[in-house]
Amino acid sequence: MGRGGIGSDGVSGGGGGVVAGELREVFEKLKGKLSEINSLEGVRNLLTWDQQVFMPVNGGAARGEQQAVIARVVHAHQTDEALGEYLEKLTVQFGKLQELGFSQLEIASVREAARDYTRTKKKPVELAARAARLESTGVGAWQKARKENDFSLFAPVLQEWLEIVREEAAAVDPELDVYDFCLDKYERGATRKSLDPFFASIKNPLIELLRQILKKREEEEGNNNPNPQFLHTKESFSGSFSVETQKRLAKKLSEELGFEYASGRFDESVHPMTINIVSPFDVRLTSRFSETDLSAGILATLHETGHGLYEQGRDAQACKDGLPASRPPGLGLHESQSLLWEKQVGMSAEYWEHYWPEVLTNFSTSLPNKTAEDSTQFHKAINEIKPSFIRVYADEVSYPLHILLRYEIEKGLLDGSLPIADVPAVWNQKMKEYLGIVPKNDTEGCLQDIHWGLGAFGYFPTYTLGAVYASMLLKTAEKQIPQLRQCIKEGQFKPLREWLREKIHVVGSLYETADELIENITGTKLDASCFLSYLSRKYGALYDLSTPAAETKADVANAS
């Protein structure tokens, strides 16, 4: 930080001490700096959103240069000496800020801003610009490689990202393991030491549950049972579904969950995403749709709506002031919101009992033989357990295995044990081991995700952390919100939305980690057994499994 910090010899104003008014003035100056940084980051996000939604293909190189310039400007503001001096004056008196009248949000913002400043100060500006440039050109390279089904076209970008990540880790926190450094960027406090046993605890139960379900389906199909216990498949609801009609319906569903379009947009992109230009005032959702798959685009929209509701539910004044404590403490918590709305609400029987008539109204010609009574079968179809090559289309049981695969590959790439050229083969081998299927090509294999094109190593684990957090949160919400399931059945989402807003969205980073916040809400730290029990109960009932493997594992965990 800058020079001239204030000593800790008092707060009354005499003998070199400071008065509360002086620190308040310093904090107001700090807010001005943070607000500027927030605005610049919003501009950077706007460029990213435009690239994904509207920018022509040939604009990629120029956009990369624009992003590099913005990155330099942002970095200069984030490492401004005046900002450092303000933070030093406040952190010296950190333990006394509460008695001097500072709110918990303001105190947490000083903590978060000081951490951001220290880490950014250590990151060379040219490295930040190089990363911003590669973020733009890397996405273009990923899109081209994906289109041409050729991983080798993307491999040089992946190599450069690994070099940048290693350089950043060495500059910012050289004593930290490189992958731990990456994990901590997205999930504060997460390390390989904490995540390895977490993933180990769910790996075998999920693989076994998946095998039990597939075996049950095989047996039922082999018996030519006219009324099988296994689910109706998505093919039972196949047809030609107008993309424009899907988009209109999906937007309506997101609006009825509570997403406010006066403060948001809804568009299409190759990869569904949510970007906050200025939360909570300008939050943008995208989704993607298929003419032959009715559920995929709708569920992807519900997923992104969950993210959008989080951004629109944040403390408006704190966001406007750029206070970093208004942000979530980790992306796993953010992901919990999208998965809660998509999976646990949007894929529930109650949800489709309410919305199935609307589907029939919009797609009567595409579903000519379906009636109101078919909502139960549609619910079963969208919960079909069938291993998928594509992560974003994966079912709830196999989805965490997709994440485990990526987690293991990222570890290998960053510690050097996995050569880049071997990624496609290792990807396919792990897909066969975990899911029993092998991608036919790179596009439906190792090139399906945008994350590595953006340099987002360490991001993937937040998806599974989010799924576990979501199961814990909904379990608690059902205890605290009377007749929650009935509310969903009636299309009344405000009780759950406002509960989440109060417990999570406006709380921001008052707690340093998501695990601390989750424990405060649910009374329990990260608990994989809750997630395993949820899956076992749901799919055990749908597939008529007597003793699901994951349930047995969860019972053991609970007993211990």
Image: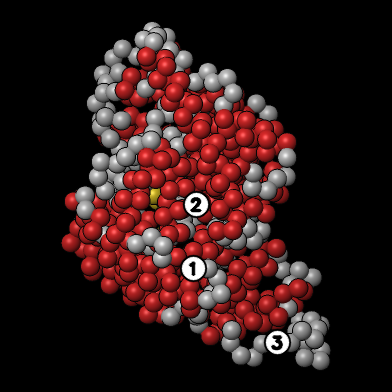
In the picture of the structure, the residue carrying the numbered disc 3 is: 6
In the picture of the structure, the residue carrying the numbered disc 1 is: 178
Considering depth in this image, is 25 or 242 the residue closer to the camera?
A: 242
Which amino acid does the dot numbered 1 rest on? Val
Considering depth in this image, is 399 or 353 the residue closer to the camera?
A: 399
Using the rendered image of the protein, determine whether residue 419 is visible from the camera's viewpoint. Answer: yes
Which amino acid does the dot numbered 3 rest on? Ile
The CA span between labels 3 and 2 is: 41 Å
Crowding near the residue tagged with mark 1, few <14, some 14–19, many ≥20 C-alpha atoms within 10 Å = many
**Circle 2 — which element?**
helix
At a point 61% along the width and 30% down the height, the residue shown is 551
Pick whichever of labels 2 and 1 is earlier in the sequence: 1
Pick whichever of labels 3 and 2 is earlier in the sequence: 3
Residues at discs 2 and 1 in contact (Cβ within 8 Å): no
The CA span between labels 2 and 1 is: 15 Å
At a point 64% along the width and 91% down the height, the residue shown is 4
Q: Nearer the viewer, mark 1 or mark 3?
A: 1
The spot of residue 281 in percent (x, y) is 47, 55
The quadrant of the picture occupied by the C terminus is top right
The CA span between labels 1 and 3 is: 35 Å
At a point 30% along the width and 51% down the height, the residue shown is 424
The spot of residue 119 in percent (x, y) is 53, 75
In the picture of the structure, the residue carrying the numbered disc 2 is: 461
Which amino acid does the dot numbered 2 rest on? Pro
Considering depth in this image, is 443 or 238 the residue closer to the camera?
A: 443
